[in-house]
Amino acid sequence: MYGRRARIGRINPSPETVGDEEWRRLMPDGVIVVSTRMYIESVDASGLTDMVMHIDRAARELATARPKVILMAGTAGAFNGGLNFDVELSRRIEQASGVVGTTTMSAVLEALKSMRIRRLAVASSYIESVDRALAGVLTGSGIDVIAIKGMGILKSIDMGDVEPEETYRFARGVFEAAPEADGYFISCGNLRTLEVITLLERKLGKPVITSNQAGLWHALRLAGVKPDEAALSVGGQLFAVEAL
């Protein structure tokens, strides 16, 4: 059967076109993603606040597919509420579904901890106010944000239309301007990053964390499933950390 090893639930922002596809390219044999959506158009404080009002309904829907883990994607939705809001969202998922819950932001923080990254440069798709909210949560979590810069995109659907070559050029510019960073983070689950992770790691010589990469890495760990060669070859240094 499909998902014989694990089904992983993913709650997406409604315009999402990237996250499920990147996960499918990294998933081990026998693991599938089952997903549902929360309405949002504009990635700003108001849109993100309204979006997460749908998380309980979405978690109940996914529970009918019997996943081992449910992750709320939409990185910004989990830091928009401030420090530890990701923990509150995870609790709501679990209460609504009876399934282990987490968020992409929780996964990113765990990935940074596992990679021992304390000084961080961040590239994102976001507008400036959303970047400030992200920097605040990272700083509150003990991360020194050396640099942060966004592409200034407001509409989630437009984020998914950015080509990987553009993501690479933008992120490389941000990261090369912060050589003192221990590692780098590209934030946004609807921004294509899978094609650029290993390129950036080879060019810059430091680990690169992305929203979709970290989310799947964390979800697989919670589900008790080891990554396979696909993840190890294209998913970056993170997938080699603390193998199960």
Image (spheres, rainbow, N blue to C red):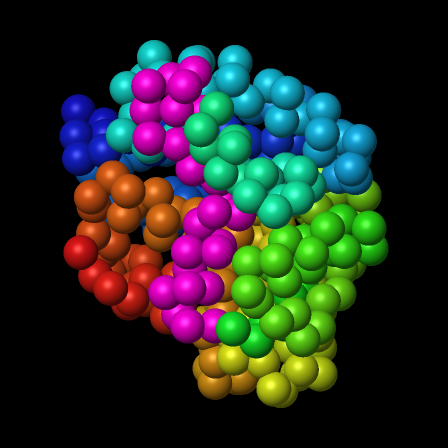
Residue span colored magenta: 93-117
Q: Main secondary structure of the magenta part?
A: helix
Left or right, 93 with respect to 217, comes to right
Instruction: Give 157 or 129, whichever is nearer the viewer.
Output: 129
Residue 158 visible in the shown view: yes
Give the quadrant of the N terminus: top left
Q: Is residue 105 magenta?
A: yes
Confirm whether the magenta stretch covers residue 109: yes
Where residue 147 appears, as percent x and y from the top left, is: 71, 73
In this rendering, position of residue 113 left or right of residue 204: left
Residue occupying the point 18% across, 56% down: 244
Q: Residue at x 61, y 47 (%)?
A: 83
Return the x and y of residue 141 as percentages of the image width and height: 55, 58
Residue sitting nearer the eye, 73 or 112: 112
Residue 200 in the image: above or below residue 48: below
Q: Looking at the image, is 174 positioned above or below residue 177?
A: above
Tell me which corner region of the image, top left, top right, bottom left or bottom right, holds residue 174. Answer: bottom right
Q: Quick check: 195 above or below 144?
A: above
Residue 119 occupies quadrant: bottom right
